[in-house]
Amino acid sequence: MHVSYTALMAHTRQTQALSQVSGLLGWDQETMMPRGAANQRGEWMGAMEAAVHARQSDPRIGDWLAQLDGADLVGADLDETAKANMRHIRRSFDRSTKIPGDLASEIARVTSVSQGIWAEARATDDFASFAPTLKRVLDLKRQEAAALSDGGDLYDAMLDDYEPGMTGARLAVLLGNLRDGLVDLRDRVRGSTVDVPDLTGEFPDAVQMQLAQELAGVFGYDWNCGRLDKAVHPFSSGSGNDTRITTRVDLANPFNCIYSTIHETGHSCYEQGIRPAYLLTPLGNGVSMGVHESQSRIYENQLGRSRAFCGWLYGRMRDLFGDFGVASEDAFYAVVNKVGQGFIRTEADEVQYNLHILMRFDLERALIAGDLEVDDLEGAWNERFAADFGYAVDKPSNGVLQDVHWSVGLFGYFPTYSLGNIYAGGLNEAMRSAVPSVDSDLAQGDTRAAVGWLRENLQQYGGLYEPVDVIERATGQTVSEKPLLDYLNTKFGAIYDV
Amino acid sequence: MHVSYTALMAHTRQTQALSQVSGLLGWDQETMMPRGAANQRGEWMGAMEAAVHARQSDPRIGDWLAQLDGADLVGADLDETAKANMRHIRRSFDRSTKIPGDLASEIARVTSVSQGIWAEARATDDFASFAPTLKRVLDLKRQEAAALSDGGDLYDAMLDDYEPGMTGARLAVLLGNLRDGLVDLRDRVRGSTVDVPDLTGEFPDAVQMQLAQELAGVFGYDWNCGRLDKAVHPFSSGSGNDTRITTRVDLANPFNCIYSTIHETGHSCYEQGIRPAYLLTPLGNGVSMGVHESQSRIYENQLGRSRAFCGWLYGRMRDLFGDFGVASEDAFYAVVNKVGQGFIRTEADEVQYNLHILMRFDLERALIAGDLEVDDLEGAWNERFAADFGYAVDKPSNGVLQDVHWSVGLFGYFPTYSLGNIYAGGLNEAMRSAVPSVDSDLAQGDTRAAVGWLRENLQQYGGLYEPVDVIERATGQTVSEKPLLDYLNTKFGAIYDV
């Protein structure tokens, strides 16, 4: 191997290690950290970020890359893995060097404060008190995007941070088509006369956690390389052989714990499924937010909320919790997939979830493009919500202030949730065509063939291919919203008899 | 403040933060980390060590220090705090720059492997299989000491890493005197006819942990800035507002959990007691291993194993565990302080613990001086043990192979345990003279006056003074073994009626 490549990869390996340490700090902060340590932790995170940034923008990286380019080695000496590594390293190097240091510091400073201001505004239902901060964050993120975009589209530059290769224009087509189909399905479901019962009974904390532990195992989680803890907002973190999941317990609603656990298991199994040889290289992580979400969602929804798996889960829950007021597997399936009415994205069902995302996508694109002012955002939100959901937002905490993302500058992040669902739709179609036994397996609580197919056809590649490419390789199809819509129409058409 | 000092401290603050992150990695490794993550964790630790080392040996530190020296600011502009900070920074910079990079890497490499070889040798009771590795470690550590010592004594250079300012010669006097007194006391206790009962009863895991939680609180541990978990070998870690303790549970012997907890609480309370202004500066940590051990030991022994506190603890244990075969507070006090017979340092009582240390000190000094060969170490150990303890070592795992320290190159570390006990003896004498209510408080489970005195007179200073200085400021006396011997003679004379 070329000496510059060896040097580049040795340098990158330590950078990756430091990034993973930062990830562990984040996990610890949400699960283990004593309350009084918050400020000290902030200084730790800042020091780690500075150490990682210094390595990512080390001028030697530019030299090594130039030597590898100039020597015309790409075709001759460097294999597919090496090319992919260099693509990732170049992207992160370009990003680190294009953003002026002062701007990066200012973004870090402002967003570390803005989250608190958002939380306070949400608590007091007062968008106006948050608007000046949001303007500042938006202004800084636009400056950052301008520095990255080389004169191109600002929103595309933002997207590139979460979903490399994706563009706002392509997303607008995919998500626009999805919206039409979802509004139609949602209207039909609303007209249905099928009545879905509510749960009764008690769901003790310890039993929910026991079931969560079991479910992670059922979905293939490797306990030798991970652990399960509680967190206020469930998340997964880590990569390689240290990939941890969290969940939460709502004593009245066990589905919160169950489906948070399966969702995070999907994320972590993706990381655990990447080829061991990629550990501590740029290929050793899930390739994008969208592809990551495709795994969490297919575990949670297409597998975990399927009729077959619900049949098995119903039995396990009856074993563990006794009678909880649901008389049959079919009724249980309908409860799990109930299409309700509400304001909150994170509580939405499969039919309506993406409608929440699509309005955020359109609104943030308009903000970035300068077509919408922050001062008009609350009104625009409420108008769009009424149009898409058919009822009015009652207060900002149920509307424009419900999500943390914009307060910390995560523009371009929301659409990756829907993109993940779209990817999951395509993967589900391909997987069920390749593995006909999926439903009969799931009815026995056996996910091995399904998750084995995902690992084999997608997860193992980590960052080897670009996001859309790895999905299209796995599905053999161009990415489209159609499989997701077909799946949702079939599923909810049956449940609601529409 | 001088611009170079400001730059120096800003640089040091991030270095301190990264060191603290490494500390958290160590904590996580022993408490939370999944088993399969061990190798990956090794790479994280290596990357963190490299990042910290790069900052500690940054040539700009030399420039800043030179500018501060040359400007003759020490007397005029810099206060006591600044001088102490510079003393610590200079020491760490000298250390980082004096040790050749190749040697540091080789030590890291060899000691990362040698611990496993030691563990295997201990498991198979085969010193010969460990001897070649120990020779290599010893050789490397001698090279390191030579690089650090500027032609001075090698053992003093090693000591300086754990107990700055202490010398082998001064230790030899202190510990030699201690040995004479301890052997005499041990012989008298052995001749005693007093019979100490054994515990009976059951000590459930959850109840032991509940008591551990309570005891940490009783000794002043701040739960807002810490937490308690289990670990195979209890330890404390962290500093400032994130200072965590661990303990272990032996179902047959609750004293293991109780006194491990109080010991680690002593370490953590020292860290928590340091002036908040020192956070993330070189003064924000306990000043040396010996002073740290003085705090853990005085909490554990002079307070936690006192007659007064044992009276209170007896009542709490009867409440929690019911009858455990001990009829009175006095009998309980004797059980807690039983002088037994055994081979293992970590299980030794207050009378014999330091005899274990003193033989290690003499043996390792002889190894470093070249007066003892590794091949002769096992024999020398067994001979010395028989002389000091009066019975023969039965197998290497109960003898020369029992401790991990030498396998990872920790020469100069053992004597800080005894030094900590000597410091604790002096502090106990001064504290009881200043706070006459200590025993009547402890009889109520109230440690506030005692630990308040320690915080006020010692803990708050962190790294402001040199180790011996901070002890002598607190006690008003030159450091001597006499207060410890007086305390032990009085205490065990009474228990054993000798």
Image (spheres, coloured by chain):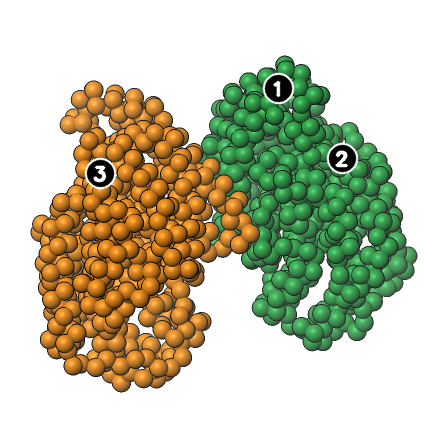
Chain colours: A green, B orange
Residue type indicated by callout 1? Leu
User: On what subunit does the disc labeled 3 rest?
Assistant: B
Picture coordinates of residue A74, whole percent (x, y): 68, 21
Quarter of the rendering containing residue A153: top right
| C-alpha span from label 1 to label 2 | 27 Å
Residue beneath disc 2: A468
Quarter of the N terminus of chain B within the rendering: top left
Disc 1 on helix, strand or loop? helix
Q: Can residue B64 be seen in the rendering of this structure?
A: yes
Q: Is residue B391 left or right of residue A156?
A: left
**Residue B216 visible in image:** no
Q: What amino acid type should be assigned to the residue bearing mark 3?
A: Leu
* Mark carried by residue B330: none
Q: Which residue is mark 1?
A: A68
Give the x, y percent position of residue A189: 85, 55
* Badge 3 and badge 2 both on one subunit: no
Q: Residues within 10 Å of mark 2 (few under 14, many from 20)?
A: some
On screen, residue A387 versus residue B231, left or right, reads: right
Q: Residue at x 25, y 41 (%)?
A: B158
Spot occupied by residue B302 in the image (x, y as percentages of width and height): 20, 64
Secondary structure under tag 3 reads: helix
Report helix, strand or loop for mark 2. helix
| Residue located at (50% from left, 37% from top) | A18
- Mark 1 or 3: in front is 3
Residue A206, image x, y percentages: 58, 68
From this viewpoint, which residue is outermost toward the top? Answer: A70
Q: Which residue is at 43% across, 45% downward?
A: B113
Name the side, left or right, on which A303 lies relative to B449: right
Nearest to the observer: residue A98 or residue A13: A13
